[in-house]
Amino acid sequence: MQAARHVRFMSTSRSLVCSHVHAQKHFLRASTSRAQSRSVASTAAAASQTPPPPPPPSQGRWRYFLQTLGRVTLVTFDPSKKTLVILGSGWGATSLLKGLDTSDYNTACHTFNSAIVVSPKNFFLFTPLLPSVAVGTLNARSILQPTRYLTRHKERQVLVIEAEAKEVDPVKKTVTLSDDSEIQGQISSTTIPYDYLVYAVGAETQTFGIPGVREHACFMKELHDAEKMQRRFLDCVESAAFPGQSDEEKDRLLHMVVVGGGPTGIELSGELRDFLEEDLKSWYPELASRIRITLVEALPNVLPSFSKELIAYTERTFKESDIEILTKTMVRKVNEKSVVLKGPDGVEREVPCGMVVWAAGNTSRQITRDLMAKLPEGQTNKRGITLDDHLRMKGARDIFAIGDCTASSYAPTAQVASQQGSYLSRVFKLLAKKDKLEADLSHAEISEEAEKLKKQIDKIKLKPFHYSHQGSLAYIGSDKAIADLPIFGREWTSGGVATFMFWRSAYLSTLFSLRNRSLVAGDWVRVKLWGRDVSRE
Ligand code: FAD
Ligand code: NAD
């Protein structure tokens, strides 16, 4: 049975006129009782307490009546529509939301919502510019976009829930979520049903179980990682400036080790170098010459996904910028004040350092591994979720997966995730049409009408997902970038200052909103005029 129908009886016409906040509370209450009836774990204590009734509307009676009438007339609950739940608010989910026709879906409760977005972050993070935040070139807020900025313009209201999905039950078709934030209300955990689930929770940083990584290294994946790195970097510099510090200790504190020669490690090393050259040299003249950046890569060269010319160009640029690259070198252990490296000669040595940034690639989140374990026949790839040609999770009913949580033949990039998201928005348009026709068919009384509907259903064909590679870009510091672009079927490579201008304009135009574009452009001007901020929060 459709989840929407399942809860029809629970809603009253009053829920159609209540405020957004009340609608959300109502939804959570309704889902909690649904969850209990389905014997799915929920917060029992919270469910047993009845929240106080919502305050009466403060506006005039006439205005209230008109609003009520408008809402009831324009947005009515349609039981033939299905419930769509989207997990995540990153590249894949945001791109889907952008293209989704929200008038095609209902939520599980009898309000005027159309889709449900669940994510522990109530914003979209523009990851390509995250390394710039780590050194203070950009303010953190400049590359965030609250998910509600996008959803508020949708035809039907989208319910955004700031919570982490803890469990997906592919048989009962439910998601259990929990609000793990610092402040929680009476209800902090619930289970919601879905008809269709879009699974777009991304990935986490791969540590390979190497000792000390989680305890002592910084990552570069989330916003708080970049903020933590910025604080730690400046802490190292200030501690080195403490009076009486020995030269040996200064050298240790000012040695920054970046692990992973993929695009994240390269971009971050380039940004660190810019901070050093453009700001730290004037703020800490006595220390600047001691600051060292070392990039450690296990493979024979950095940036394996870029062309040979660009790899050589990056390595040359890093050499000129005094960034040391250690290839064929594995990090075996991270200590509080050092890293243990195993070089090409097979010998292990301990290298003192002040900070380690770990950018060694992706691995699946625990929730993804748990979900895959429930579908052992279709899901055996350790890299992530296996999909069919239409991005449906193999072995599951009505679960679509996109982005970094999947294992496909494409690299885990924003480009792939956002193309998959837009593809799914088209798929959901067709699915809604098909679902509507099937609902009509189930009520068709005349056989002629039924035949016509069947023909229309047969005509709806979903095209498989096709990825179109737009090229790869990366910033390498010193106002230089590299680009591998497919132009007229040929690979065109370019590196240097002009490519840097192209890199900036490409990312500026890719930012989702005018607000973000103006904030980022403003930050670039600010840094050119006054330099980066060296104060430490
Ligand atoms: P994400 O964008 O990571 O989104 C995952 C979402 O799921 C997040 O909102 C997260 O909060 C949410 N989530 C997590 N756990 C849960 C849960 N349990 N329940 C509900 N929601 C959950 N790619 C490029 O193509 N070009 C670039 O220049 C580029 N630069 C990058 C720079 C950096 C520093 C990094 C780290 C990555 C970069 N990438 C780039 C890669 C790109 O960011 C990823 O491929 C992309 O983010 C994948 O999109 P996604 O939607 O799968 O995951
Ligand atoms: P990655 O997987 O591309 O690179 C990680 C690197 O770390 C690998 O080269 C690996 O050999 C190395 N490594 C792993 N363990 C190591 C160890 N113990 N010691 C030394 N080296 C070790 O990871 P990433 O750079 O975080 O990128 C993740 C994804 O995001 C990729 O698909 C990438 O293309 C994408 N991305 C793209 C851009 C861009 O296009 N500008 C920027 C950032 C990320």
Image (cartoon, rainbow, N blue to C red):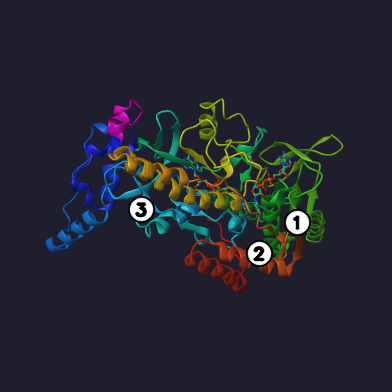
462 relative position to 303: left or right: left
Q: At label 1, which amino acid type do we have? A: Arg
Disc assigned to residue 290: 1
Disc assigned to residue 103: 3
Name which residue lies at 68% across and 47% down. Answer: 354
Observer-side mark, 1 or 3, equals 3
Name which residue lies at 50% across and 48% down. Answer: 424
Measured as percent of width and height from the top left, residue 375 is found at: 52, 27
Q: Nearer the viewer, residue 458 or 296?
A: 458
Asked if the stretch drawn in magenta spans residue 35, the answer is: yes
Name of the residue lying farthest toward the right: 345
Mark found first going from the N terminus, 2 or 3: 3
Q: Are marks 2 and 3 in contact (CB under 8 Å)?
A: no
Q: Which residue is mark 2?
A: 503
Mark found first going from the N terminus, 1 or 2: 1
Q: Hey, which quadrant is residue 292 in on the image?
A: bottom right
Q: How many marks?
A: 3
Q: Hey, which quadrant is residue 202 in on the image?
A: top right
Residue at mark 1 to residue at mark 2: CA–CA distance: 31 Å
Q: Nearer the viewer, residue 442 or 371?
A: 442
Residue at mark 2 to residue at mark 3: CA–CA distance: 37 Å
Name which residue lies at 44% across and 38% down. Answer: 165
Mark found first going from the N terminus, 1 or 3: 3
Residue bounds of the magenta highlight: 32-45
